[in-house]
Amino acid sequence: MFRVAVLASGGGTDFQSIIDAVECGYLNCSIEALITDNPKAYAIKRAENHKIKTYVFDRKQYKGKLSDEILKVLEEKVDLIVLAGWLSILKGDLLKKYNHKIINIHPSLIPSFCGDGMYGIKVHERAIEYGVKVSGCTVHFVDEGTDTGAIILQKAVEVLDNDTAESLQKRVLEEEHKMLPKAIKLISEGNVKVEGRKVKIRG
């Protein structure tokens, strides 16, 4: 069975979408672990509710060694690492050994409103301020940069005239909960091929 680990820093609604997709049979995968860099993350409770093994590596304690600790517990134990609302930057051997095997979901249409400091509600605030007519979400591979990896899937969401950052975030999140399991399914079934910056999807 295809083995997945999920990294989450907060409430874990994207994590929950993966759990739900596994439990309903949409994903033929096992969630081997939740890793969080935040001891207070509600994602921990979600893992407990579904008997998923959890590792807590407090970012304040581990700092630059965080990626090495993650590699220690996951190496050769999972086929894909999924960042689902993960706020720490991954680096080093973890990225090398899991090249094209780490994915992230970002709440905008990359390359818009992404990169350093762009996460959570800040992304939607920037979209509203800029006056874009369309926003959305992006699932991409993780590389050495911030939100710079090859794009797997994107979903557009219309920005309404009366939108606030919070209302836009809510509608984008609904699409995130569909796109993230879809990307995992495509990868787990061998239907994703990477050629440079281009990701080709079969089926």
Image (tube, rainbow, N blue to C red):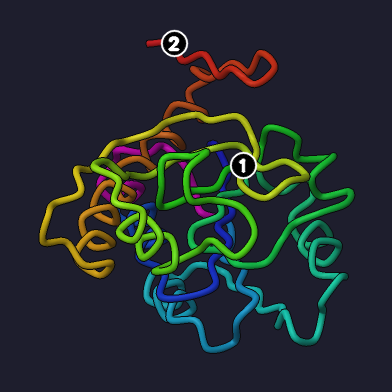
Image point 38% across, 33% down: which residue? 154
Image point 89% across, 48% down: which residue? 93
Residue 146 at x, y = what percent? 67, 50
Secondary element at tag 2:
loop
N-term-proximal mark, 2 vs 1: 1
Q: Is 67 placed above or below 99 here?
A: below
Residue 48 at x, y = what percent? 44, 78
Residue 187 at x, y = what percent? 51, 28
Circle on res. 202: 2
Residue 126 position by quadrant: bottom left
Image point 56% across, 47% down: which residue? 4
Where are the magenta residues, as a range? 21-31
Residue placed most toward the observer, 64 or 133? 133
Image point 65% across, 74% down: which residue? 55
Secondary element at tag 1:
strand
Residue 100 position by quadrant: top right
Residue 20 position by quadrant: bottom left
Amino acid carrying label 1: it is Leu
Position of 155 with respect to 79 (left or right) is left
Q: Is 197 placed above or below 166 here?
A: above
Q: Residues within 10 Å of mark 2 (few under 14, many from 20)?
A: few
Q: Is 48 placed above or below 34 here?
A: below
Residue 23 is a magenta residue: yes
Circle on res. 80: 1
Residue 186 at x, y = what percent? 44, 26
